[in-house]
Amino acid sequence: MTEPVLSVRNLRVEFPVRGGVLTALNDVSLEIRAGEILGVVGESGAGKSMTGLAVQSLLEPPGRIAGGEVILNGRRIDHLSETEMQKIRGREIGAIFQDPLTSLNPLFTVGAQLSETIRLHLDMSKREAKSRAVELLKQVGIPAPEERVNHYPHQFSGGMRQRVVIALALAANPKLIIADEPTTALDVSIQAQIIALLRRLCDDLGTAVMLVTHDMGVIAEAADRVAVMYAGRLAEIGPVREVLSNPSHPYTRGLMGSIPALGARVKMLRQIDGSMPRLNAIPQGCAFNPRCQVSGPRCFQDRPDLFPAGQGQAACWHVQGGVQ
Amino acid sequence: MLVFLIKRLSNAALVMLAVSLMAFTIFRFVGDPVELMVNEQTTEAQRAELRERMGLNDPVLVQFASFVGKAVQGDFGISYRNQTDVMSLIGERFPATMELVLLATIISLVVGLPLGVITAIHRGKWFTESIQFASIIGVSLPSFVIGILLILAFSVNLGWLPAFGRGQVVDFGFWSTGLLTKSGLLALILPSVALSFYQITLVMRLVRAEMLEVLRSDFVKFARARGVPAHRLYYRHALRNCLMPVVTMTAMNIGSLIAFALVTETVFQWPGMGLLFIQAVTFVDIPVMAAYLVIVSFIFVTLNTLVDIAYALIDPRLRNATH
């Protein structure tokens, strides 16, 4: 097997606050290979965006990586200086943000922003950068790119702007793209187009993608593997088909159960009772235990590690060892 | 863009018309102009003749029309006090004020913009806190106090800079400048620094507040995620998005600086319009006051129009606006 593009090992992110330290990410390990889309799902605050930000060293202070390793293309990057990270951001890691309406600078043409990114990372003349900008816009499916390159962000629709954002992420041919909720701010028909575009670019260019989302539909459509996060930890990780159709972790089962299906005749959607614990009140043992319907005494004592489950892994005593 | 320009210009013309109506009203109805011009020995016949010659017997509308017509050509009549053409009086003084105000504005931008950016970036560090603290002093000290302190320090104690006047000036027909001689430049330093003190503080605090806002925005975070280096992020992406309110405030302030430079001009005995205006008020020199009113509002209106055009240049989203 080839070496993964990104490999995160036992990542721990902490936020020092008054009267203690909050652990936002705890023992997160995952890998993404070239041409693969890893979906990262979870509720708000589960740590899915945090994982993406930590990989890019974009954590808001006072947040910091307190342990573990981030290895990109065989090189450890979690301890690099800000100047060194600048060369990696955009060059080796492309980013896609949630809201295309606000992620572009309103005062510069999309061409200027593309050229800026291109010339920051690749040794190109202004003219070469401009023609690459046009090429990129074409690649992400923007019609009349020669003309559009001189337009300002406000002259594009939301979906088109997200395509521009994707073009910006691709500008320097990064091996990894971190897409944080790339479709959440778009309407459904545009969502499908953007997902298809990501899938196509991933296949054509062999780019690895970390797709952060809370939308199981997007995961089902786009991802190869999926990581389910809960309270700053991985609950389950594995091939998307396996996790979606045969989830091992009770939380994943709960998530799957709460998706409305057109075919199924159900009166009420199943929901997971309660809410995710706050970071300063994570219970002993398995973090999911207060909401779990199949928990046993052990779940309140010991925290389960990720155990092999089918083709993936799940952090649940039901998978290995039993709950008694 | 053209429609936008025409609308803005006709707005400006309307405002100017309203202002000249006020100036005319002051001129015509605050005291009897004839009474103000003559002395006790003037006979009734001479007064009537003067009244006729000045057109004061014509219908008010005709008088207003001729006032506007003359004002457009720069003719505001004769100063009561000096018996000279008002426009040439103002023409002598205007360049002095203009140079003072422009230099003060440039100083306030050159110092205020970087200070604002720096205090926004390094929020909470000891040197930004001290700059912030010093800026409060800048706002609270009135400009004449600053002027007097500056004179005390640099003219009286150190003897480096002149305390009053404009120094030697060079004439270019309608414009006399102090920028080309050494004494003129030296004389300009203290008053423009005194005048810019308050402006520096304003610019700095405004830029700081705007920067803090913009630095939180998504596009700055996204630019960082694209690998844009910090200084480029701050000075190219963020600062430009802060400029709109700065442009507005600066332009408005140029107007008020011209109008209110009189305090500084008095302290430094600067031969500008402010000093002229004070003398005009003292002697109830109505034509000078009326002309001053019209000219200052003309500058305000011009600046306002320029600001609108500058908006469109800074922000592409406003270029097609039709309001």
Image (cartoon, grey):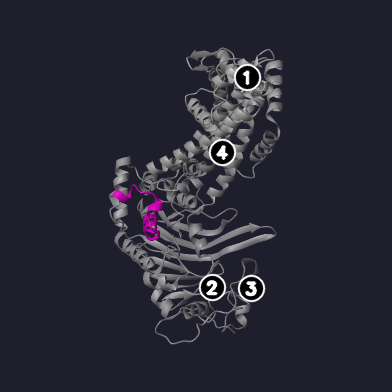
Q: Write down the region rendered in magenta.
A: A147-166
Query: Do the numbered discs 3 and 4 sit on residues whose CB atoms are within 8 Å?
Result: no
- Is B198 or B298 nearer to us in this picture? B298
Earlier-in-chain disc, 3 versus 2: 3
Q: Both on one chain, marks 3 and 4?
A: no
Q: CA distance from mark 2 to mark 4?
A: 60 Å
- Is B151 or A42 nearer to us in this picture? B151
Is the magenta region chiefly helix, strand or loop?
Answer: helix
Foreground tag (2 vs 4):
4
Q: CA distance from mark 3 to mark 2?
A: 15 Å
Q: Both on one chain, marks 3 and 1?
A: no
Q: Which residue is mark 2?
A: A305
Question: Which residue is at a point 58% across and 39% down the rendered structure image?
Answer: B116
Q: Amino acid at mark 3?
A: Pro
| Circle 4: element type | helix
Q: Which residue is mark 3?
A: A283
Q: Which residue is mark 1?
A: B270
Compared across the picture, whether A146 is left or right of B185 comes to left
Indicate the position of residue B317 as horizontal and vertical percent values: 43, 48
Question: Which residue is at a point 42% across and 48% down the rendered structure image?
Answer: B322
